[in-house]
């Protein structure tokens, strides 16, 4: 038994989700695990250097600790949406609108050592929601089930 817990959200909505305490179910993994350091404990926040659209930096995020800093929290309670600080939600919505309906695009979250990617297509129906989380936990973006369905997530306690 390990000091971790893992969350699995299936692509198929009729398949059962899973919360596994004390271990990792490697059958759920499509790739090797990538460990990312937590930037703020308590909310499982991870620092984001920038957002990308089709691999190109969007230049939306400032340095960590600034008003325009970006971080994400993978949140199992956020359904079908990307919740972001209001200033970021507006800018992101504008950039996605400027490139059509966003369908067929790849939205990315550039971390220190890897990128989290989400392919935007008609079945994803990405919804942007403005949520201003106050300091000390904010600003933060909440990535819900659209991301958790793509990535098997493991949390190291």
Image (cartoon, grey):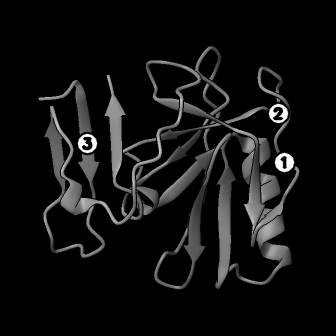
Secondary structure at numbered mark 3 = strand
What residue is pinned by disc 2?
68
Using the image, determine if residue 116 lies above or below residue 83.
Answer: below
Q: CA distance from mark 1 to mark 3?
A: 30 Å
Q: Judge whether 64 appears above or below 110 on screen.
A: above
Q: Residues within 10 Å of mark 1 (few under 14, many from 20)?
A: some
Q: Cβ–Cβ below 8 Å for labels 2 and 1?
A: yes
Residue 130 or 30: which is nearer the viewer? 30
Q: Quadrant of residue 64?
A: top right
Of mark 3 and mark 2, the one earlier in the sequence is 3
Position of residue 139 measured from the top left corner of the image (x, y, whole percent): 67, 29
Report the residue at 27% width, 47% height from top.
Answer: 7
Q: Which numbered disc, 2 or 1, marks the residue that appears first in the sequence? A: 1
Q: Find the distance from the CA under tag 3 to the CA under tag 2.
A: 30 Å
The x, y position of residue 146, in whole percent, is: 44, 62
Q: Earlier in the sequence, mark 1 or mark 3?
A: 3
Query: Where's the C terminus, which quadrant?
Result: top left
Determine crowd level at label 2: few under 14, some 14-19, many 20+ residues with C-alpha closer than 10 A.
Answer: some
The spot of residue 118 in percent (x, y) is 56, 67
The vertical placement of 127 against 4, above or below, is: below
Residue at (77%, 32%) from the top-left corner? 69
Residue at 40 percent across and 58 percent down: it is 151
Q: Which residue is mark 3?
A: 6
Residue that badge 1 annotates: 60
Foreground residue among 47 and 79? 47
Quadrant location, the N terminus: top left
């Amino acid at each position: 038994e390990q000091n971790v817990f893992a969350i699995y959200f299936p692509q198929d909505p009729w398949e059962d989700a899973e919360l596994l305490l004390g271990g990792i179910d490697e059958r759920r993994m499509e790739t090797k695990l990538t460990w990312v350091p937590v930037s703020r404990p308590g909310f499982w926040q991870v620092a984001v250097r920038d957002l990308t659209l089709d691999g190109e930096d969007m230049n939306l995020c400032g340095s960590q600790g600034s008003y325009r800093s970006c971080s994400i929290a993978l949140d199992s309670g956020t359904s079908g949406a990307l919740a972001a600080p209001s200033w970021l939600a507006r800018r992101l919505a504008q950039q996605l609108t400027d490139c059509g309906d966003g369908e067929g695009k790849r939205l990315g979250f550039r971390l220190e050592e890897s990128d989290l990617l989400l392919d935007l297509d008609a079945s994803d129906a990405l919804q942007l929601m403005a949520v201003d989380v106050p300091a000390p936990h904010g600003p933060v973006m909440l990535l819900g089930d659209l991301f958790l369905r793509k990535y098997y997530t493991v949390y190291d306690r």
